[in-house]
Image: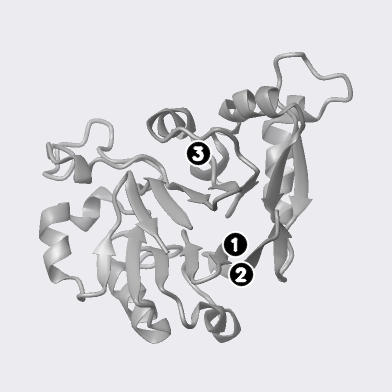
Amino acid sequence: MQIILTGTGTSQGVPVINCKCEVCRSENTYDKRLRTSAIVKFQDTTLLIDAGPDLRQQLLAHPVERIDAILITHPHHDHIGGMDDLRPFFFRQKKPLDIYAGEETRKAIQKKYYYAFDENPYPGAPQFNLIQLENRAFTINNHQILPIYAWHGKMPVWGFRFGNFAYLTDIKEISEEEQAKLQNLDVLVLSALHHKKHHSHLSLSEALALIKKVNPAKAYLTHISHEMGKYEKIKKILPKNVFLGYDGLEIKT
């Protein structure tokens, strides 16, 4: 299995427009972050996690022949705002694209992309097949996926476990029962916004505490704000098994 972190930034991305902080002015490519998204590739199957407003740019940088399904964590714009850019896959694959999402997200997608669900759709529009996520394992092309239920403030958010790899972004709270699904991981990707406490995101210290508790062999941080600090500085203060994610990072398990 190969995982590509195609975006590791927050809803504004990094650099933030008109920001003059040292991170946003950095010339280090590791300090430049598109909105959070990832590709999970098996030998016979390619999955996309989230489809934010930078999706076109991300898929041009990391091209794939097909997308077998899209897994959506939650309905915020930085996670669903680029779904129209999935049209080339719909045209090439000649069938509606399977999108796995929770109830709130399904409603948001139907509202935002109403034209993808018309009975007589415009010929240039994509078509989506919305599949309800439930808190039990399911398979795509014989690959088992275990949903992980967490909270993004007051909003439910879904993470996913694929074998010995798990991906959780935009979380603030997760129950003991759901944390049990994160045991015995080789790799965990987990969001960490910045250093300060936040009402709907894990801070760096909170993310590190969760990582220590579930104890993966390695962990990579994503959904990182410009307020986190420069990549070269922050990587030096992390535990030896924890790393700052960056756009284009490839992980193999």
Q: State the CA–CA distance, disc 1 to disc 3.
A: 16 Å
Which residue is the site of mark 3? 52
Disc 1 marks which amino acid?
A: Trp
* Relative image position of residue 240 (x, y in whole percent): 20, 75
Q: Is residue 93 left or right of residue 155?
A: right
Which residue is the site of mark 1? 158
Disc 2 marks which amino acid?
A: Tyr
Residue 25 visible in rendering: yes
Q: Reading the chain from its start, which is encountered first: label 1 or label 2? A: 2
Q: Which residue occupies 71% across, 61% down?
A: 139
Element at label 1 = strand
* Relative image position of residue 197 (x, y in whole percent): 33, 68
Which residue is the site of mark 2? 149
Quadrant for residue 205, please give it: bottom left
* Relative image position of residue 152 (x, y in whole percent): 52, 63
Element at label 3 = loop
